[in-house]
Image: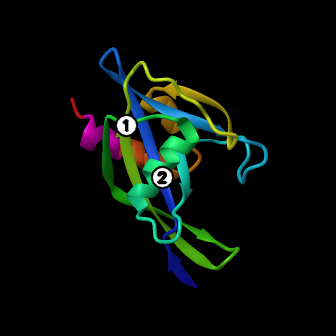
């Protein structure tokens, strides 16, 4: 078994009436885990730094431009039986303007802006839900 890090996770939020709204994207039927709601995710290209991959994936999957971009102080992980590896996933967060327009890629079929509570109810994995809590406590504490 090997440990790899070739995927990023990026949570996007905007502030609407002083409350955070998280962007969730619905995966296309042609993708792995079709139909699930998720944050932006994607592969790190060879020679690319993880934070640059997150910024690239943000643009490719949503067309959004961040007004702030940060590293979330957690790393998610999962086991892949396909290549007998544990993947360590760095987590990032960015804020976008409240009036911004989302332009989803063909990797997704829909998007929605939701409250943190709804985001956590729709995200499939504990680590993703935990990331929302860390973002709330670390970046959005009132």
Q: Over which residues does the magenta segment extend?
A: 134-140
Which residue is at a point 59% across and 46% down the rendered structure image?
Answer: 124
- Residue 27 at what x, y percent from top left? 68, 42
Q: Secondary structure at mark 2?
A: strand
Frontmost residue, 124 versus 35: 35
Mark 1 burial class by Cα count in 10 Å: few <14, some 14-19, many 20+: some
Please identify the quadrant where the C terminus is shown. Answer: top left
Which residue is at a point 61% across and 34% down the rendered structure image?
Answer: 104
> In the picture provided, is 35 more to the left or to the right than 121?
right
Frontmost residue, 29 versus 1: 29
The residue most toward the right is 30
- Residue 109 at what x, y percent from top left? 70, 34
The residue most toward the bottom is 1
Q: Is residue 39 visible?
A: no
Tell me which secondary structure the magenta stretch mostly adopts: helix
Q: Which residue in the protein does label 2 denote?
A: 9
- Residue 57 at what x, y percent from top left? 52, 49
- Residue 52 at what x, y percent from top left? 41, 56
Frontmost residue, 10 versus 51: 51
- The image's mark for residue 66 is 1
Disc with the residue nearer the chain's start (1 vs 2)? 2
> In the picture provided, is 22 more to the left or to the right than 37?
left
């Amino acid at each position: 078994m090997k440990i790899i890090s070739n995927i990023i996770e990026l949570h996007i939020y905007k502030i609407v009436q002083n409350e955070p709204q998280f962007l969730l994207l619905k995966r296309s039927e042609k993708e792995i885990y079709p139909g699930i709601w998720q944050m932006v995710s994607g592969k790190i290209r060879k020679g690319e730094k993880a934070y640059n991959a997150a910024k690239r994936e943000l643009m490719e999957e949503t067309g959004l431009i961040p007004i702030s971009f940060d590293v979330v102080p957690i790393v998610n992980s999962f086991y892949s039986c396909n290549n007998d590896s544990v993947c360590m996933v760095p987590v990032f967060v960015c804020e976008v303007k409240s009036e911004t327009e989302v332009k989803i890629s063909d990797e997704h079929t829909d998007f929605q802006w939701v409250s943190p509570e709804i985001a956590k109810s729709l995200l499939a994995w504990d680590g993703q839900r935990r990331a929302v809590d860390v973002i709330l406590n670390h970046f959005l504490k009132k």
